[in-house]
Amino acid sequence: MLVEVETNLLKPKIIKGDLVISDKAKKNVKVNDIISYITLENGKAKIRTNKIVAITKDNSSQKIYSLKKENGTIENIDDSCILGTYKMTIPLVGTILTYILSKRGFYTVVVLPSIILAILFLIDFLLDLIKSRKEKTQT
């Protein structure tokens, strides 16, 4: 699983804009493990990457994982929220992908080069056409 990091909580190992690869198979986690998990923020589901700072159990003996948030508060999640454990980081690729998937990035990376390429093909075609007409008139 690929997750873009949106905070600097795990700096210097992982910084905002990095792309984290998480292992979906490994879910047996312990304190200080870095995990990718799903959480609700302002009523919307978000996928985040963070480090487990503590593990406790609730009244029904279910594990509760505590994660320190950027504002210093603690967020608690259970096993059902964990999507995978940290495997590796690809620096800044998350930022690049986010830009490419934006409207501006689409125009910059896809549309503009396509227009330039079409113009170059048109110029090449017109030059070949002019060259062939010159050759016909000379013979």
Image (spheres, grey):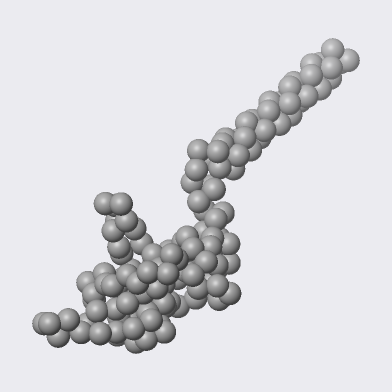
Locate residue 106, reporting x and y percent: 53, 40
Q: Going by the image, does 24 lie left or right of 95?
A: left
Taking the spot 30% from the left edge, 63% from the top edge, the residue there is 39
Locate residue 62, reporting x and y percent: 17, 82
Taking the spot 73% from the left edge, 22% from the top edge, the residue there is 126
Locate residue 26, reporting x and y percent: 33, 81
Say how many tags the image has.
Answer: 0
In the image, residue 51 above or below residue 126: below
Taking the spot 29% from the left edge, 84% from the top edge, the residue there is 55
Residue found at the far right of this picture: 138
In the image, residue 85 above or below residue 137: below
The answer to whether residue 132 of the structure is visible from this angle is no
The answer to whether residue 103 of the structure is visible from this angle is yes
Quadrant of the rendering where the C terminus is positioned = top right
Q: Going by the image, does 75 lie left or right of 94?
A: left
In the image, residue 124 above or below residue 44: above
Quadrant of the rendered image containing residue 33: bottom left
Query: Observer-nearest residue: 24 or 66?
Result: 66
Query: Observer-nearest residue: 64 or 71?
Result: 71
Locate residue 67, reporting x and y percent: 36, 74
